[in-house]
């Protein structure tokens, strides 16, 4: 039989699932958080930046240095003060100021 199957009928959703709570909250940097102090072992520490939801292609900066359009998986940092910023596709700016001692 060489015929195409019949076209599917239209789906009507009468009771959609609610969006997760996270979808209604603004994006925030959850790590590192402003004011956090990290301990450097042998002069360095590793920080794993995290946000509370997917931001899409955002621009990431560390102390005004462009890191790329994807969230960095890890930052290996020496002692000092830092500002991590993320500019979302909608222009929202997320920022965190922290230290490594």
Image: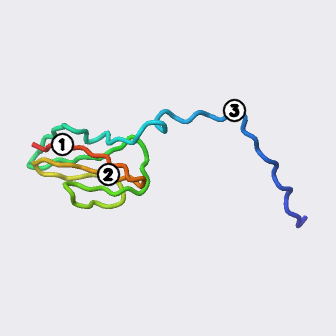
Distance between the alpha carbons at the discs numbered 2 and 1? 15 Å
**Which residue is identified by label 2?**
86
From the viewer's perspective, is 76 left or right of 13? left
What is the x, y in percent for residue 49? 29, 47
Give me the residue at 19% from left, 37% from top: 36
Residue at (32%, 42%) from the top-left corner? 29
- Residue 15 tag number: 3
- The picture places residue 26, in percent across and down from the top left corner, at 41, 39
* Residue located 22% across and 60% down the image: 65
Circle 1 sits in a helix, a strand or a loop, which is it?
Answer: strand
Of callouts 3 and 1, the N-terminal one: 3
On the rendered structure, is 52 left or right of 37?
Answer: right
- Name the residue that disc number 1 marks: 98
* First in residue order: circle 2 vs circle 1: 2
Residue lying furthest bottom:
2
Q: CA distance from mark 3 to mark 1?
A: 45 Å
């Amino acid at each position: 039989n060489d015929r195409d199957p019949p076209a599917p009928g239209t789906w009507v959703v009468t009771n959609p699932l609610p969006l997760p709570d996270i979808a209604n909250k603004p994006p925030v940097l959850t790590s590192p958080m402003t004011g956090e102090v990290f301990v450097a072992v042998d002069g360095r520490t590793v920080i794993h930046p995290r946000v509370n939801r997917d931001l899409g292609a955002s621009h990431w900066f560390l102390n005004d240095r462009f890191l790329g359009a994807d969230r960095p998986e890890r930052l290996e940092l020496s002692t000092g003060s830092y500002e991590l910023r993320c500019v979302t596709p909608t222009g929202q700016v997320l920022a965190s100021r922290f230290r490594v001692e």
